[in-house]
Amino acid sequence: MQSNEWSSDEGEDLSAESAADGAQAKIAELEAALLAVRDEQLRERADLDNQRKRLVRDVDQARKFANERLLAELLPVIDNLERGIEAAGTDFERLREGVQLTLRQLLKVGEDHGLQVIEADGQPFDPEFHQAVSTVASAEHPANSVVQSMQKGYSLNGRLLRPALVVVAQ
C-alpha cells in the first residue's frame, strides 16, 4: 500500500506542479500583456505630445505669416512712395498727382482685404460708427447729422476698426 500512497502523493505533486506551471504561464502571459499595454500607452502619449507640439508650431507659423499676402500687396505702394520722394523736385503738382495715385492704390489694397471707409458727411449721427468731437448750430443741416468729418472712420469686414471723428449739428 505504500507504493499506492506514494503514487497518489506523486500524482498530487504532479498536478500541483502542473497547476503551478499553468499559473506561472498565466502570470507571464498577463505580465507580457501589461507591458504591451504600457508600451502602447507610452506611444499614444508620445503621439499626442508630438501632435500638440506640431499644432502649437503651426499656429505660431500662421500668426507669424498671417499678413504676408497683405504686406506683399503693400510693397508696390511703398515703392511708389519712394519713387515719388526721389522724383519730387519742385514740381508740386506732379508730386500731388503721384501721392493721390499712391493713396488710391493703398485704398484699393485695403478694400481687397475687407477695409471699408465709413462715410460720415451729411449722414445722421450714428454712435456705433461716429465719435462726436464737437457740436455746432447749423441752419443748413438737420439736427443730429454730421456736418464735417475730422478724421475718416474704417471698418474691417463689417467690424469697426476706428470710428469717424465728426462735428454734429445741434
Image: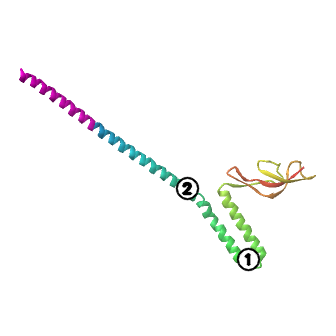
In this view, the residue farthest toward the front is 2
Residue 21 lies in the magenta stretch = yes
Residue 126, x across and y down, in percent: 80, 48
Q: Is residue 36 above or below residue 162?
A: above
- Which of 125 and 43 lies nearest the eye of the viewer? 43
Side of 7 where 81 appears, left or right: right
The quadrant holding residue 103 is bottom right
Q: In terms of secondary structure, what is the magenta stretch mainly?
A: helix
- Which of 29 and 53 lies nearest the eye of the viewer? 29
Disc 1 + disc 2, Cβ < 8 Å: no
- Which of 162 and 103 lies nearest the eye of the viewer? 162
In this view, the residue farthest toward the bottom is 89
**Amino acid on which the number 2 mark rests in the picture:** Ala
**Part of the protein shown in magenta:** 1-28
Quadrant of the rendering where the N terminus is positioned:
top left
User: For the point 39% across and 43% down, which residue is it?
Assistant: 41
Q: Which residue is mark 1?
A: 88
